[in-house]
Image (cartoon, grey):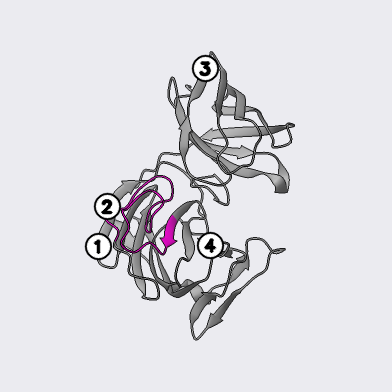
Amino acid sequence: MSFIGRWDITVGEGEAAYPSWVEISETDGRFVGKVGSARPVPIVEICGEALHFELPPQYEGYPNDLCFDGVLADGVITGTTNAKDGSLLPWTAKPAPEFVHIGMPIYGQSIDIIETPWHARWPEMENHWSVVDGDLVNSKQGTDLVTDASYSNFKLEAEYSYPVDSNSGIYLRGRYEVQVLDDYGKEPSVGSSAAIYGFLAPKVNSVKPFGERNIAEITLIGREVTLVLNGVTVHDHAEIPGITGGALESDEGAPGPILIQGDHGPVTYHRLVLTPITFG
C-alpha cells in the first residue's frame, strides 16, 4: 500500500484526541488540522515505509512548524507529531473510505430535528441555545450544539437567519461544514456563505441580506454534496475531499450527527428537516 492518497487522522489519545486529515502526493499535499481550513503541505518526504511531512501553523498557535512522522504498516500510519508545548503526541491515520452505492436512492420518513434531542458540544462553555416558538435560537456566542442521533446519507432542509456580521455553520455528519455567514454581495470563496469550508466555493453567492431568511437544501450521499441556496444550485454533485476544521472526528465512513455552530455568533434556525436516504 502507498502513502499517496487521502488519510483520516486522529491525533492524541482518549478524551484529548482530535481529528485531522491529509492528502499526500509524491512531493506535497494538503492538510486540515483541529481548526481552520485546508492548506498546502509544502514538505513531504517518503522513504520506503516511512513518511515525514511538515507545514506552518495556521490557527494552532504553535511557535514552530507542525511536523508529522509515521510508518505505514497493515494499511495504517502510526507515528508522532509535535504538540504546542514541544512534547510529542501519537497519531494514527486510516485511508479515507471509498463510497459505493448500488441501486436507486430511497427517501425515508422526514425528521424535524429541532424537536429531537441535542447536547452541548462543550458542556463547560456557556450555552445560549433555546427553542422559541419552534425556532432553534442561539442568542449569543457560546457552545456548539450536536444532535444525539447520527445519520448516513440524507437531505437536510435548513431555513435560517442571523443579525449583521454573524457567523455560524452546519456540520454534516459532524465533519463537513456548510458555512453560514453574513456576506451578502461578496464574491464567493471557500470561506463564503454556502461554501464547504476551506474546500469548495459556491458557484455563486446567493445568500440574502442579514435579517432575511435563507433556505438551503443540502443532499449528502457519501462524500458528494448538492446544495441549493435560495433556489440557486451552488454545489452540484461536488466531491468533498475530506473533513473540515472543527470536525467532531475523522471516521468518514461512519454515520455522524448534525452539528450547528454557536461559538461564532447569534443565529436562528427556523427549520431543520432531515430526510434519510438509503439505496436499494
The answer to whether 62 is drawn above or below residue 141 in the figure is above
N-term-proximal mark, 4 vs 1: 1
Q: Mark 3 points at which residue?
A: 46
Q: Which residue is drawn at 46% across and 61% down?
A: 170
Residue 79, image x, y percentages: 65, 27
Q: Residues under labels 3 and 1: Cα distance?
A: 44 Å
Q: Residues under labels 1 and 2: Cα distance?
A: 9 Å
Q: Name the residue under label 4.
A: 261
Tell me if label 4 and label 2 are in contact, CB under 8 Å. no
Question: Does the magenta segment cover residue 194?
Answer: yes
Residue 55, image x, y percentages: 54, 30
The answer to whether 274 is drawn above or below residue 89 in the figure is below
N-term-proximal mark, 3 vs 4: 3
Helix, strand or loop at disc 1? strand
Question: Which residue reaches farthest left?
Answer: 232
The mark closer to the camera, 3 or 1, is 1
N-term-proximal mark, 3 vs 1: 3
Question: Does the magenta segment cover residue 154?
Answer: no
Q: Residues under labels 4 and 1: Cα distance?
A: 24 Å
